[in-house]
């Protein structure tokens, strides 16, 4: 019997490549999201420090010009935190989208894997059946039975 050949093997390879690419994009998106989280955390600490500095300046009784300068510094950190928060939300959306791509690519690949496995089992079963028929025929020839040359069908129990 000829060797097993899966006619959709090239499509299977393409699906595996698509899945790996989706996984890579997902990993990149996770890294970007993590980076955005770290940056937002650092900016939040700086913002808190700026507000503490403003409070300390107020308690120290500084002049109006210095107070305006510290307040402007606090506003800059507020704006920076808002920008980084928006960047984090955008990164999280990308993570969600790429995660969905990975799930779809994995589903598509698994469908082809299941079809491959199903066809391989059918092929293996046909090979075993053919080998058993060949062995049965050889046994009949060796025993000198008059059924030599007849095609055997079904299981040995069904033939009795």
Image (cartoon, rainbow, N blue to C red):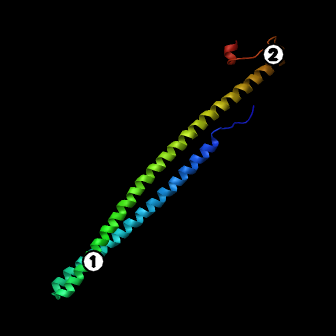
Instruction: Give the secondary structure at mark 2.
Output: loop
> Residue 41, how many percent across, how many down?
34, 69
Q: Is residue 33 above or below residue 80?
A: above
Quadrant hosting residue 70: bottom left
> Residue 121, how many percent across, how many down?
63, 33
Q: Is residue 95 above or below residue 123?
A: below
> Residue 143, how many percent across, how many down?
82, 16
Q: Tell me how many marks there are.
A: 2
Label number found at residue 72: none
Label number found at residue 49: 1
Q: Using the numbered discs, state the Cα–Cα distance from disc 2 to disc 1 in whole angstroms.
A: 96 Å
Extreme residue toward the bottom, this view: 63
Left or right of 60, for residue 27? right
Residue found 19% across the figure and 84% down from its top: 67
**Dot 1 alpha-carbon crowd within 10 angstroms: few under 14, some 14 to 19, many 20 or more:** some
Residue found 49% across the figure and 57% down from its top: 25
Residue found 28% across the figure and 76% down from its top: 76
**Dot 2 alpha-carbon crowd within 10 angstroms: few under 14, some 14 to 19, many 20 or more:** few
Quadrant hosting residue 129: top right
Left or right of 93, for residue 145? right
Instruction: Give the secondary structure at mark 1.
Output: helix
> Residue 81, how many percent across, how many down?
31, 70
Q: Nearer the viewer, residue 144 or 112?
A: 112
Quadrant showing the C terminus: top right
Label number found at residue 149: 2
Left or right of 65, for residue 89? right
Quadrant showing the N terminus: top right
């Amino acid at each position: 019997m000829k060797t097993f050949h899966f006619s959709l093997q090239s499509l299977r390879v393409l699906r595996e490549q698509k899945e790996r690419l989706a996984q890579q994009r997902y990993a990149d998106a996770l890294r970007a999201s993590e980076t955005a989280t770290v940056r937002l955390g650092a900016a939040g600490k700086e913002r808190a420090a700026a507000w503490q500095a403003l409070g300390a300046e107020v308690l120290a009784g500084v002049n109006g010009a210095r107070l305006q300068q510290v307040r402007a510094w606090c506003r800059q950190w507020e704006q920076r935190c808002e920008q980084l928060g928006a960047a984090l939300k955008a990164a999280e959306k990308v993570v969600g989208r790429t995660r969905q791509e990975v799930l779809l690519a994995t589903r598509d690949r698994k469908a082809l894997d299941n079809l491959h496995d199903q066809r391989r089992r059918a092929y293996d079963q046909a090979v075993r059946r053919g080998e058993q028929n060949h062995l049965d025929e050889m046994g009949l020839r060796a025993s000198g039975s008059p059924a030599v040359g007849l095609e055997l069908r079904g299981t040995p129990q069904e033939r009795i």
